[in-house]
Amino acid sequence: MEMELKTLFSPEKIGNVEIKNRIVRSATYTHAATGDGHVSDLLIKYHTDLAKGGVGLIITGITTIDKVGTISPGQTCLYDDSYIEGHKRMVDAVHEYSDVKIAPQLSHSGRQGITAIAPSAIIFKEDDRMPKELTNEDLKEVIKNFIDAGRRAYESGYDLLTLNAAHGWLLCNFLSPFTNKRSDEYGGNTQNRMRILVEIYNGIVDEVGKNFPIVVKLQTQDFVDDGLKLAEGKIIAKELVDLGFAAIEPSGGSAEVSRLFKIRYPAPRVQSQDDENYFLPAVKELKPIMKDSKIILMGGVRNPVTAEKLLQENIIDFIALSRPLICEPDLPNRWKNDDLTPPLCNSCNSCFFSTGTGSVTCTVKEKLIQERLNK
Ligand SMILES: Cc1cc2nc3c(=O)[nH]c(=O)nc-3n(C[C@H](O)[C@H](O)[C@H](O)COP(=O)(O)O)c2cc1C
């Protein structure tokens, strides 16, 4: 007999906010905002399709906190008040569907940006560009911009807020010793490298209070010799839990590292059971320090029965998925209705490579639609 997915479809809180089940949509950049970064009807459709599909919490996708931090047109923005109205429209549209919660992911492109800025002037090895090293004054401005964007997210009606401190973006650039060689109070030891994250957290809480839970997608390892290692990732996570972060979604790797070393994190192919749940070792390492904060398992989560077991054994609190929900936004409802056939997503990563060329697409999904049309 199939295992009943009782815990997977039971509610749990992140901070003071109840999520109706344990399934989170991990942040996914859909490239579907308007050219100047406003919420579009297409972007709303992506998110209402997810809401209808049964997910408990939607984390939208990289939402830029200032102009320099933008990776490309089509990215959502929260760097001035004119953006709030569109975000409100999206939040309201999602809230119409059976109590689904939604959070933006505040992000700055850092070393990976078009106008690259970074903690230190170290060549960005993906295309040999030299980023501009942030002065202390620039840095204060970036921190203020994160805090202001946090306030705008709150005013837009989002249920929670998430920060992107992973995958080679600016906050991750500060955490990682191989990209942060600063000699001021924002570089050097662990406390200094995580200071930017702490100041952003404290600033947002000062603006909007403690009832707006803040979650972090956290770089816990870089997968390079002189990079962040899991042991230090754990120390950082502990500090963030003690500070008040409501949940942590451990991650690792970056595009730069992937291309250099062929370690394709954060989104490697998942072709067999052995490839699944590839950040589970990081989650297991962090779980004992989580106190009342929640741990989210992300990365190759494909099997609801395994997820149910991990939840029942109290190893994880939530699962998060990205690629399978691009292919099948209604996957959670399918699981709820006892259709446990594997996700259609074969992690071919066509979605990953499509984000530079228009809104996100999925080859598997398009093929299915075409087959249906041909019938
Ligand atoms: C098309 C695409 C866009 C993504 N955009 C983001 C993003 O905006 N922010 C982020 O933190 N991760 C982003 N990711 C990474 C995913 O959130 C996730 O960490 C990764 O795909 C592994 O999870 P999965 O195996 O469920 O896909 C993206 C991944 C894909 C495929």
Image (cartoon, helix red, strand yellow):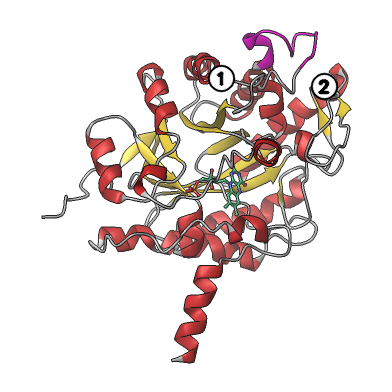
- Kind of residue indicated by mark 1: Lys
How would you rate the neighbour count of disc 2 (Cα within 10 Å): few for under 14, some for 14-19, many for 20 or more? Answer: many
Tell me which corner region of the image, top left, top right, bottom left or bottom right, holds residue 236. Answer: top right
Picture disc at residue 5: none
- Kind of residue indicated by mark 2: Ser
The residue at 47%/42% (across/down) is 299
**In this view, 206 is above or below 327:** above
Q: Is mark 1 within 8 Å of ligand 1?
A: no
Give the SS element for disc 1.
loop
Give the labeled residue for mark 1: 229
The residue at 50%/15% (across/down) is 231
Q: Where's residue 110, x and y in %?
A: 77, 34
Q: Where's residue 330, x and y in %?
A: 40, 64
Q: Quadrant of the C terminus?
A: bottom left
Give the labeled residue for mark 2: 120
**In this view, 242 is above or below 63:** above
Q: Is mark 2 within 8 Å of ligand 1?
A: no
Q: Where's residue 273, x and y in %?
A: 35, 47
Of badges 1 and 2, the one in the foreground is 1
Report whether 79 appears left or right of 303: right
158, 320: nearer the viewer: 320
Q: Which residues are magenta?
A: 181-193
